[in-house]
Image (tube, rainbow, N blue to C red):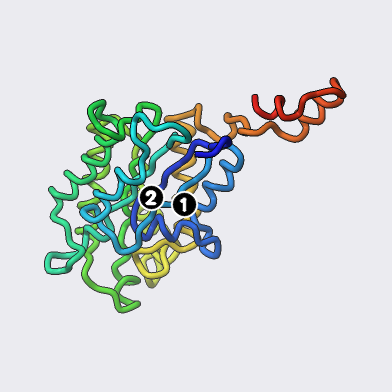
Amino acid sequence: MSNLDYNTIVCFGDSLTQHGWDVSKHGWVAQLSQVYLRKLDVDNRGFSGYNSRWTLPLLPRILPTTDSEGARPRILTILLGSNDAMLPGCVHHVPIEEYRSNIESMVNMVTDPQSANYSPDTKILLITPPALGEKLYKSVGFDGRTPESVKACADVMRDIAERHSLPCVDLWTAVETQAKEIGGELDGYDKFSYDGIHLSAGGNDLLFKLVLQTIKLHYPELDPSNMPYVIPHHSDLIAAITENKDLDIAQFLSK
Protein backbone atom coordinates (compact mmCIF):
# COMPACT_ATOMS: atom_id res chain seq x y z
CA MET A 1 0.00 0.00 0.00
CA SER A 2 1.36 3.42 -0.96
CA ASN A 3 0.41 6.84 0.37
CA LEU A 4 -1.27 7.62 -2.96
CA ASP A 5 -3.61 4.74 -3.69
CA TYR A 6 -6.15 5.11 -6.48
CA ASN A 7 -9.30 3.05 -6.22
CA THR A 8 -9.68 0.69 -9.13
CA ILE A 9 -11.77 -0.90 -11.84
CA VAL A 10 -11.00 -4.63 -12.00
CA CYS A 11 -11.67 -6.17 -15.41
CA PHE A 12 -11.85 -9.93 -14.85
CA GLY A 13 -12.21 -12.60 -17.50
CA ASP A 14 -10.56 -14.54 -20.30
CA SER A 15 -8.76 -13.49 -23.49
CA LEU A 16 -11.52 -11.03 -24.40
CA THR A 17 -10.39 -9.07 -21.35
CA GLN A 18 -6.65 -9.83 -21.55
CA HIS A 19 -6.59 -8.63 -25.15
CA GLY A 20 -8.52 -5.56 -24.06
CA TRP A 21 -5.14 -3.88 -23.49
CA ASP A 22 -4.25 -4.22 -27.19
CA VAL A 23 -4.32 -0.66 -28.46
CA SER A 24 -3.74 -1.85 -32.05
CA LYS A 25 -7.24 -3.33 -31.85
CA HIS A 26 -8.74 -0.42 -29.86
CA GLY A 27 -8.78 -2.59 -26.73
CA TRP A 28 -11.84 -1.85 -24.62
CA VAL A 29 -9.89 -2.05 -21.34
CA ALA A 30 -7.31 0.40 -22.68
CA GLN A 31 -10.09 2.78 -23.70
CA LEU A 32 -11.61 2.45 -20.23
CA SER A 33 -8.24 3.26 -18.68
CA GLN A 34 -8.00 6.40 -20.79
CA VAL A 35 -11.35 7.87 -19.72
CA TYR A 36 -10.64 7.12 -16.03
CA LEU A 37 -7.11 8.53 -16.11
CA ARG A 38 -6.23 10.15 -12.74
CA LYS A 39 -9.62 9.06 -11.37
CA LEU A 40 -9.55 5.27 -11.10
CA ASP A 41 -6.81 2.81 -12.00
CA VAL A 42 -7.94 0.07 -14.38
CA ASP A 43 -6.54 -3.38 -13.57
CA ASN A 44 -6.63 -5.92 -16.40
CA ARG A 45 -7.10 -9.36 -14.90
CA GLY A 46 -7.90 -11.27 -18.06
CA PHE A 47 -6.53 -14.80 -18.45
CA SER A 48 -6.38 -16.01 -22.03
CA GLY A 49 -7.65 -19.58 -22.48
CA TYR A 50 -9.25 -19.74 -19.04
CA ASN A 51 -12.87 -20.67 -18.29
CA SER A 52 -15.06 -19.95 -15.26
CA ARG A 53 -13.84 -23.11 -13.49
CA TRP A 54 -10.21 -22.07 -13.73
CA THR A 55 -10.74 -18.39 -12.93
CA LEU A 56 -13.00 -18.98 -9.92
CA PRO A 57 -10.12 -19.69 -7.48
CA LEU A 58 -8.22 -16.67 -8.79
CA LEU A 59 -10.82 -14.03 -7.99
CA PRO A 60 -10.45 -14.10 -4.17
CA ARG A 61 -6.71 -13.61 -4.67
CA ILE A 62 -7.34 -10.56 -6.86
CA LEU A 63 -9.99 -8.87 -4.74
CA PRO A 64 -8.97 -7.25 -1.44
CA THR A 65 -10.35 -8.72 1.74
CA THR A 66 -13.09 -6.83 3.54
CA ASP A 67 -10.79 -5.63 6.31
CA SER A 68 -7.81 -4.73 4.13
CA GLU A 69 -6.69 -1.11 3.90
CA GLY A 70 -5.84 0.92 0.83
CA ALA A 71 -7.28 1.02 -2.68
CA ARG A 72 -10.51 -0.83 -3.37
CA PRO A 73 -12.36 -1.80 -6.56
CA ARG A 74 -15.19 0.56 -7.33
CA ILE A 75 -16.22 -1.50 -10.37
CA LEU A 76 -15.73 -5.20 -11.14
CA THR A 77 -16.45 -6.40 -14.68
CA ILE A 78 -16.87 -10.13 -15.31
CA LEU A 79 -16.66 -11.37 -18.90
CA LEU A 80 -16.51 -15.16 -19.17
CA GLY A 81 -18.22 -17.86 -21.19
CA SER A 82 -16.50 -18.07 -24.56
CA ASN A 83 -14.19 -20.87 -23.35
CA ASP A 84 -16.83 -22.53 -21.16
CA ALA A 85 -18.85 -22.81 -24.39
CA MET A 86 -16.37 -25.24 -25.94
CA LEU A 87 -18.19 -28.49 -26.69
CA PRO A 88 -18.04 -31.60 -24.45
CA GLY A 89 -14.79 -33.48 -24.96
CA CYS A 90 -12.71 -30.29 -25.00
CA VAL A 91 -10.72 -29.63 -21.82
CA HIS A 92 -12.11 -26.06 -21.73
CA HIS A 93 -15.74 -27.21 -21.68
CA VAL A 94 -17.76 -26.37 -18.58
CA PRO A 95 -21.33 -27.71 -18.25
CA ILE A 96 -23.85 -24.89 -18.33
CA GLU A 97 -25.09 -25.40 -14.76
CA GLU A 98 -21.53 -25.38 -13.44
CA TYR A 99 -20.93 -22.19 -15.42
CA ARG A 100 -23.98 -20.69 -13.74
CA SER A 101 -22.73 -21.76 -10.31
CA ASN A 102 -19.25 -20.36 -10.95
CA ILE A 103 -20.53 -16.93 -12.02
CA GLU A 104 -22.96 -16.88 -9.07
CA SER A 105 -20.04 -17.64 -6.74
CA MET A 106 -18.05 -14.75 -8.19
CA VAL A 107 -20.94 -12.37 -7.63
CA ASN A 108 -21.43 -13.64 -4.09
CA MET A 109 -17.77 -13.05 -3.24
CA VAL A 110 -18.48 -9.33 -3.49
CA THR A 111 -22.12 -9.13 -2.39
CA ASP A 112 -22.38 -11.67 0.45
CA PRO A 113 -21.66 -10.07 3.87
CA GLN A 114 -20.22 -13.41 5.01
CA SER A 115 -17.62 -13.43 2.22
CA ALA A 116 -13.99 -12.62 3.05
CA ASN A 117 -14.06 -10.34 -0.03
CA TYR A 118 -17.36 -8.63 0.75
CA SER A 119 -17.29 -5.10 -0.64
CA PRO A 120 -20.58 -3.19 -0.62
CA ASP A 121 -18.98 -0.24 -2.42
CA THR A 122 -17.90 -2.38 -5.39
CA LYS A 123 -20.32 -2.20 -8.32
CA ILE A 124 -20.54 -5.26 -10.57
CA LEU A 125 -21.00 -5.29 -14.34
CA LEU A 126 -21.68 -8.68 -15.88
CA ILE A 127 -20.80 -8.92 -19.58
CA THR A 128 -22.10 -11.62 -21.90
CA PRO A 129 -19.70 -13.27 -24.34
CA PRO A 130 -20.12 -11.97 -27.88
CA ALA A 131 -22.13 -13.90 -30.44
CA LEU A 132 -20.05 -16.38 -32.41
CA GLY A 133 -19.73 -15.75 -36.15
CA GLU A 134 -19.74 -19.33 -37.39
CA LYS A 135 -18.59 -18.76 -40.97
CA LEU A 136 -15.75 -16.51 -39.85
CA TYR A 137 -14.84 -18.92 -37.03
CA LYS A 138 -14.54 -21.87 -39.40
CA SER A 139 -12.83 -19.83 -42.12
CA VAL A 140 -9.74 -19.46 -39.91
CA GLY A 141 -9.69 -23.16 -39.10
CA PHE A 142 -11.32 -23.02 -35.67
CA ASP A 143 -13.75 -25.62 -34.37
CA GLY A 144 -15.20 -26.70 -31.03
CA ARG A 145 -17.76 -23.99 -30.36
CA THR A 146 -21.18 -23.41 -31.87
CA PRO A 147 -23.35 -20.30 -31.94
CA GLU A 148 -25.79 -22.18 -29.70
CA SER A 149 -23.21 -23.10 -27.06
CA VAL A 150 -22.04 -19.50 -26.79
CA LYS A 151 -25.63 -18.22 -26.70
CA ALA A 152 -26.37 -20.57 -23.79
CA CYS A 153 -23.62 -18.92 -21.73
CA ALA A 154 -24.84 -15.45 -22.72
CA ASP A 155 -28.38 -16.38 -21.64
CA VAL A 156 -27.11 -17.55 -18.25
CA MET A 157 -25.05 -14.40 -17.70
CA ARG A 158 -28.08 -12.29 -18.53
CA ASP A 159 -30.26 -14.34 -16.16
CA ILE A 160 -27.80 -14.06 -13.26
CA ALA A 161 -27.68 -10.29 -13.71
CA GLU A 162 -31.47 -10.12 -13.57
CA ARG A 163 -31.72 -12.36 -10.50
CA HIS A 164 -29.14 -10.28 -8.61
CA SER A 165 -30.48 -6.93 -9.87
CA LEU A 166 -27.16 -6.22 -11.55
CA PRO A 167 -26.62 -4.43 -14.85
CA CYS A 168 -25.69 -6.65 -17.76
CA VAL A 169 -23.68 -5.49 -20.75
CA ASP A 170 -25.37 -7.60 -23.42
CA LEU A 171 -22.54 -7.86 -25.93
CA TRP A 172 -24.06 -11.02 -27.43
CA THR A 173 -27.27 -9.28 -28.50
CA ALA A 174 -25.44 -6.18 -29.72
CA VAL A 175 -23.11 -8.19 -31.97
CA GLU A 176 -25.83 -10.54 -33.18
CA THR A 177 -28.24 -7.73 -34.03
CA GLN A 178 -25.75 -5.48 -35.75
CA ALA A 179 -24.06 -8.31 -37.66
CA LYS A 180 -27.40 -9.35 -39.13
CA GLU A 181 -28.02 -5.78 -40.24
CA ILE A 182 -24.60 -5.66 -41.95
CA GLY A 183 -24.75 -9.08 -43.61
CA GLY A 184 -22.30 -10.02 -46.33
CA GLU A 185 -20.14 -13.04 -47.08
CA LEU A 186 -19.28 -13.58 -43.39
CA ASP A 187 -22.73 -12.52 -42.14
CA GLY A 188 -21.41 -9.24 -40.75
CA TYR A 189 -19.46 -10.73 -37.85
CA ASP A 190 -16.16 -9.61 -39.38
CA LYS A 191 -17.11 -6.06 -38.35
CA PHE A 192 -16.67 -7.10 -34.70
CA SER A 193 -14.25 -10.03 -34.73
CA TYR A 194 -11.16 -11.15 -36.62
CA ASP A 195 -11.71 -14.87 -36.05
CA GLY A 196 -15.36 -15.28 -35.08
CA ILE A 197 -14.80 -15.12 -31.31
CA HIS A 198 -12.09 -12.55 -30.40
CA LEU A 199 -12.81 -8.85 -30.74
CA SER A 200 -11.47 -6.72 -33.56
CA ALA A 201 -11.21 -2.93 -33.35
CA GLY A 202 -14.91 -2.71 -34.20
CA GLY A 203 -15.84 -5.20 -31.48
CA ASN A 204 -13.69 -3.45 -28.89
CA ASP A 205 -15.20 -0.08 -29.79
CA LEU A 206 -18.67 -1.57 -29.39
CA LEU A 207 -17.90 -3.16 -26.02
CA PHE A 208 -16.28 -0.01 -24.65
CA LYS A 209 -19.30 2.02 -25.73
CA LEU A 210 -21.71 -0.43 -24.06
CA VAL A 211 -19.69 -0.59 -20.82
CA LEU A 212 -19.51 3.19 -20.52
CA GLN A 213 -23.21 3.57 -21.32
CA THR A 214 -24.06 1.01 -18.65
CA ILE A 215 -21.92 2.72 -16.02
CA LYS A 216 -23.50 6.09 -16.79
CA LEU A 217 -27.01 4.65 -16.59
CA HIS A 218 -26.71 2.45 -13.51
CA TYR A 219 -23.81 3.99 -11.57
CA PRO A 220 -23.86 7.71 -12.46
CA GLU A 221 -21.60 8.56 -9.52
CA LEU A 222 -18.92 6.51 -11.31
CA ASP A 223 -19.43 8.19 -14.68
CA PRO A 224 -15.90 9.48 -15.37
CA SER A 225 -17.30 12.88 -16.32
CA ASN A 226 -18.78 13.12 -12.80
CA MET A 227 -15.60 12.13 -10.96
CA PRO A 228 -12.88 14.50 -9.78
CA TYR A 229 -9.18 13.87 -10.23
CA VAL A 230 -7.53 12.15 -7.28
CA ILE A 231 -4.84 14.86 -7.42
CA PRO A 232 -6.20 18.34 -8.31
CA HIS A 233 -6.02 19.61 -11.86
CA HIS A 234 -3.04 21.91 -12.43
CA SER A 235 -5.40 24.87 -13.00
CA ASP A 236 -6.75 24.45 -9.45
CA LEU A 237 -3.22 24.38 -8.09
CA ILE A 238 -2.27 27.51 -10.04
CA ALA A 239 -5.39 29.30 -8.83
CA ALA A 240 -4.58 28.43 -5.24
CA ILE A 241 -0.97 29.62 -5.61
CA THR A 242 -2.16 32.86 -7.22
CA GLU A 243 -4.49 33.46 -4.29
CA ASN A 244 -1.90 32.53 -1.67
CA LYS A 245 1.78 32.79 -2.63
CA ASP A 246 2.71 31.16 0.69
CA LEU A 247 0.54 28.13 -0.04
CA ASP A 248 1.68 24.90 1.52
CA ILE A 249 1.64 22.88 -1.71
CA ALA A 250 2.14 19.51 -0.03
CA GLN A 251 -0.84 20.17 2.24
CA PHE A 252 -2.98 21.39 -0.67
CA LEU A 253 -2.23 18.27 -2.69
CA SER A 254 -3.03 15.98 0.22
CA LYS A 255 -6.65 17.13 0.44
Q: Residue at x 46, y 52 (%)?
A: 206
Three-letter amino acid code of the residue under disc 2: Ala
* Labels 1 and 2 touching (C-beta < 8 A): yes
Q: Residue at x 65, y 27 (%)?
A: 254
Q: Nearer the viewer, residue 183 or 123?
A: 123
Q: What element does badge 1 sit on?
A: helix
Three-letter amino acid code of the residue under disc 1: Leu
Task: Tell me the residue that label 2 is attached to.
Answer: 174
Task: Tell me the residue that label 1 is attached to.
Answer: 206
Quadrant position of the C terminus in the picture: top right
* Drawn side of residue 67 relative to residue 205, left or right: left
Q: Nearer the viewer, residue 148 or 5?
A: 5
210 shown above or below 194: above
User: At which x and y percent is residue 69?
Assistant: 43, 31
Could you tell which of marks 1 and 2 lies nearer the N-terminus? Answer: 2
* Drawn side of residue 16 relative to residue 39, left or right: left
User: At which x and y percent is residue 171?
Assistant: 37, 49
Q: Residue at x 23, y 38 (%)?
A: 160
In this view, the mark in front (1 or 2): 1
Q: What element does badge 2 sit on?
A: helix
Kindly identify which numbered label has been placed on residue 49. Answer: none
| Quarter of the view holding residue 193 | bottom left
User: At which x and y percent is residue 65?
Assistant: 34, 35
Q: Residue at x 86, y 25 (%)?
A: 242
